[in-house]
């Protein structure tokens, strides 16, 4: 079972989805999470921050509500006095083959992600083609990729905030800070390189071998190292455990969430954050007893292994303290 | 383009990874020139449609006439159903007031959609034209665009920076026909479109003397490196001051109250102030104009342009326009010039001078040069606006206005453009004025009535009043006695002319 909690080297902040009240609604909770976690500590007036979000494919209907992003963007704006750039990359993993900037934007608008709802500055990471970026070295031993090309909205910013819609993920186990802040920040051609022909749609009847999946996870984590280097390590992460579906946002459909909403987590440590997310999910899924590894059953990915590999790559620590913000 | 089908991605066919890396990326984006490109007009004068800037009834609204011209000039035939249609406009500099009003652009987006096209509005990033330029960074440019009313909500379609977040998302296009340039770089959102409608605000320009649709292509469609090339940043040596700014001995150094702003103006720190002048590092300079514009428009004369720079830049931007046109098949680009608020300077200026002449109207056609020539001729023939720089310089109707105001004749560009096949300077002007009749009055209204269940507002209000008649049920509305003295005489006491009819 996932229980990484030990001495608490890293801090993860968690605000529960329940209870709600007139003075403790989602907005209050998110603001509280930001302030308790000292999330904007590394920011200062004039800085240009980028927010990496997960927009949804046409047909996926449990996408994160734009308001959840807007609240965080406004909190950042209070410090920087600039509205941050809110971005996502063109969906290379694009079921409908519409991977052009204008179609991407139309799909995002249909999901409520527009300048109007987000307060402006909603842009495509990697430009119209999705391939505009810069190469960054992966400075860890025995790496496979050598370097990765990070999308320009992210690599040209002063700081990166990774706002992830937590879902199951058929290639990575869970979509959270590690995947959204790594693989998802790369340009299209780079993501194709990381995928190496893996089929991201297991519902098509194609399955990927465990070995292939492990290879993908490793490469995706290396991508995260490159992204971190591109912003000089100035990254903060928020995981939204809200409408957690089996399908990630790039799927062209979605089924009902498989677990109730658990709330929002924040940390400057991606590994700790995803570990805490995973632990909370496991705890809730096994609340009636038992030790089912639901994520492994559904995705063929042993997420604990992914987390350990991430830690070994220096992306964070499994040794964390979970602070429940009330 | 064939009917668009949503075909799922065939992942099994994508076993081979796409290699990353800037060098590979550049090779792969090499030259998207369409095979069927060619000048639109093959023989004789090109037709240009024009509608004057005036209106006295529903049909003559400038917005309605813009829509009419779209069809009269057959711009609807530039694309097929399902085509991705780029609408190229200028997003306008921060604090600029004389920009093309968003209604004109929205009107054309509506008609592109009505004809089955998928429009999206585009503009590229600029170079840093002055210290406070907002268009050089895509994020700032979008903030400015929103402030001008250029949003997805206004246009009903995406509003995109064509050359990406950093201005590097582009294609290289070869232009061996070019008078000066032999290559340029075009923003991908433009190069990858199936068709394009270019909507320009026709007005003056400090470098190219005049800016209309050709300028929208020759600079507006160029990515950052396309703009550097068009600026001739690769040309000559520092002493020529062609590919570099001209540093004079007029700089007062730190005695200039703008010296910090001047130092800040260069993104590559190619110059810095000293006690009595400037030190210039030409190897760092890429001729973005920032130092020159900052100096000149601060009222100083330490950094300026060589006079012969301008005609060469004008000719170069015609070459660059060809690069943009070569991204499309023949006839896939339509042009519209809105000669409204005809200011002396470009929309990339963070202010707006008084218009040099009254509003002229809208020009449309498929031959770039013909539309430009017709626009220029019409502007030249207009009266001079009082208080404008044109009046200050003593211009008369018929003068080449932008030559007199900005220094060189825009016809230099037109002659160069004609030579490389961008179009013909010979045009036949078709004056278009809509007929006032019930059909035309209804044609472009928000709810035009007559078709399906569409009802004009008054007819719709009948339905509303049938459910709840405001006039009888809510308002205390009843006829009352009134004072006839008020009707015929009393009001005249408030009129400085005592009710006299104007003669």
Image (cartoon, grey):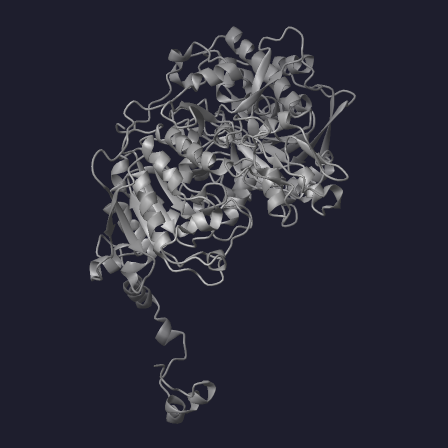
User: Is residue B418 in view?
Assistant: yes
In the figure, residue B40 lies in which quadrant?
Answer: top left
Q: Which quadrant does the C terminus of chain B fall into? A: bottom left
The residue located at (36%, 39%) in the rendering is B414
The residue located at (43%, 55%) in the rendering is B341
Q: Where does residue A112 sit, x and y in percent of width and height?
A: 47, 40
Q: Nearer the viewer, residue B375 or A99?
A: B375
- A37 vs B287, left or right, is right
Above or below, comparing residue B468 to residue B200 in the picture: below
Total labels: the figure holds 0
- B309 vs B368, left or right, is right
Q: Nearer the viewer, residue B384 or A281?
A: B384
Q: Where does residue B442 sit, x and y in percent of width and height?
A: 25, 58
Q: Where does residue B260 sit, x and y in percent of width and height?
A: 71, 42
Q: Nearer the viewer, residue A235 or B266?
A: B266
Q: Where does residue B91 sit, x and y in percent of width and height?
A: 48, 43
Above or below, comparing residue B221 to residue B496 in the picture: above
Above or below, comparing residue A70 to residue B490 in the picture: above
User: Is residue B161 in view?
Assistant: no
Q: Which quadrant does the N terminus of chain B fall into? A: top left
The residue located at (48%, 18%) in the rendering is B26
Which residue occupies the extreme right position in the image?
A: A7
- A37 vs B339, left or right, is right
Above or below, comparing residue B163 to residue B61 in the picture: above
């Amino acid at each position: 079972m996932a229980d990484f909690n030990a001495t608490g080297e890293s801090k993860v902040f968690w605000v529960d989805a329940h209870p709600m009240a007139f003075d403790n609604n989602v907005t209050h909770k998110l603001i509280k999470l930001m302030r308790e976690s000292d999330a904007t500590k590394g920011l200062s007036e004039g800085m240009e921050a980028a927010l990496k979000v997960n927009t949804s494919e046409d047909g996926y209907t449990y996408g994160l509500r734009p308001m959840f992003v807007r609240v965080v963007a406004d909190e950042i704006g209070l410090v920087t006095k600039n509205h941050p750039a809110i971005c996502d990359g063109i969906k290379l993993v694009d079921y409908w083959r519409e991977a052009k900037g204008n179609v991407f934007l139309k799909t995002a608008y249909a999901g409520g992600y527009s300048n109007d709802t987000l307060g402006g500055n909603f842009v495509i990471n990697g430009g119209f083609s999705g391939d505009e970026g810069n190469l960054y070295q992966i400075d860890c031993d025995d790496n496979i990729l050598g370097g990765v090309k990070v999308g320009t909205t992210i690599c040209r910013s002063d700081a990166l905030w990774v706002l992830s819609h937590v879902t199951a993920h058929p290639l990575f186990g869970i979509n959270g800070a590690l995947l959204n802040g790594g693989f998802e920040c790369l340009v299209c051609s780079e993501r194709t390189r990381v995928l190496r022909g893996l089929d991201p749609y297991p519902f098509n009847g194609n399955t990927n071998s465990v070995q292939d999946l492990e290879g993908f996870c490793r490469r995706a984590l290396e991508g995260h190292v490159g992204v971190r280097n591109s912003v000089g390590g100035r990254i903060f992460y928020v995981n939204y455990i809200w409408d957690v579906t089996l399908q990630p946002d790039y799927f062209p459909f979605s089924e009902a969430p498989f677990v109730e909403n658990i709330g929002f987590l924040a940390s400057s440590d991606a590994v700790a954050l995803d570990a805490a997310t995973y632990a909370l999910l496991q705890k809730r899924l096994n609340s009636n007893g038992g030790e089912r590894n639901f994520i492994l059953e559904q995705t063929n990915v042993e997420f604990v292994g992914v987390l350990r590999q991430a830690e070994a790559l220096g992306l964070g620590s499994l040794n964390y303290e979970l602070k429940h913000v009330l | 383009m064939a009917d668009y089908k949503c075909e799922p991605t065939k992942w099994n066919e994508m076993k081979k990874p796409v290699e990353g890396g800037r060098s590979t990326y550049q090779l792969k984006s090499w030259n998207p020139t369409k095979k069927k490109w060619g000048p639109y007009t093959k023989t004789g004068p090109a037709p240009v449609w024009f509608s004057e800037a005036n209106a006295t009834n529903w049909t003559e609204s400038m917005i309605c006439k813009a829509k009419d011209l779209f069809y009269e000039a057959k711009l609807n035939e530039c694309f097929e159903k399902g085509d991705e249609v780029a609408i190229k406009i200028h997003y306008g500099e921060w604090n600029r007031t004389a920009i093309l009003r968003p209604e004109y652009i929205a009107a054309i987006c509506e008609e592109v959609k009505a004809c089955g096209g998928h429009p999206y509005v585009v503009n590229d990033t600029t170079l840093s034209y002055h210290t406070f330029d907002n268009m050089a960074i895509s994020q700032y440019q979008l903030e400015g665009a929103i402030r001008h009313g250029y949003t997805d909500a206004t246009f009903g379609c995406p509003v995109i920076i064509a050359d990406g977040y950093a201005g590097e998302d582009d294609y290289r296009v070869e232009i061996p026909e070019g008078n000066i340039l032999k290559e340029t770089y075009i923003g991908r959102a433009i190069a990858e479109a199936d068709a394009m409608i270019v909507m320009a605000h026709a007005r003056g320009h400090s470098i190219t003397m005049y800016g209309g649709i050709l300028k929208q292509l020759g600079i507006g469609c160029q990515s950052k490196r396309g703009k550097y090339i068009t600026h001739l940043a690769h040309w000559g040596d520092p002493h020529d001051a062609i590919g570099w700014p001209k540093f004079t001995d007029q700089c007062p150094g730190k005695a200039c109250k703008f010296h910090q702003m001047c130092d800040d103006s260069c993104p590559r720190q190619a110059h810095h102030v000293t006690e009595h002048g400037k030190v210039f590092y030409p190897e760092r300079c890429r001729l973005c104009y920032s130092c020159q514009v900052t100096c000149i428009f601060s009222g100083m004369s330490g950094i300026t342009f060589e006079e012969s720079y301008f005609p060469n830049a004008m000719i170069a931007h015609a070459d660059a326009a060809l690069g943009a046109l070569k991204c499309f098949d023949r006839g896939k680009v339509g042009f519209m010039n809105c000669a409204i608020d005809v200011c002396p300077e470009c929309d990339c200026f963070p202010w707006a001078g008084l218009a040099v002449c009254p509003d002229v109207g809208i020009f449309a056609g498929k031959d770039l040069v013909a539309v430009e020539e017709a626009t220029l001729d019409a502007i030249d023939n207009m009266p001079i606006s009082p208080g404008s720089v044109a009046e200050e310089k003593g211009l008369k109707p018929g003068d080449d206005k932008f030559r007199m105001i900005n220094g060189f004749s825009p016809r230099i560009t037109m002659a160069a453009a004609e030579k490389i096949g961008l179009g013909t300077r010979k045009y036949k002007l078709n004056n278009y004025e809509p007929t006032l009749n019930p059909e035309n009055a209804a044609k472009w209204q928000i709810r035009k009535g007559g078709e399906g269940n569409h009802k004009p507002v008054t007819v719709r209000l009948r339905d509303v009043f049938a459910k709840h008649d405001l006039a009888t049920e809510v308002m205390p509305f009843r006829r009352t006695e009134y004072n006839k003295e008020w009707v015929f005489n009393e009001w005249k006491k408030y009129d400085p002319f005592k009710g006299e009819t104007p003669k």
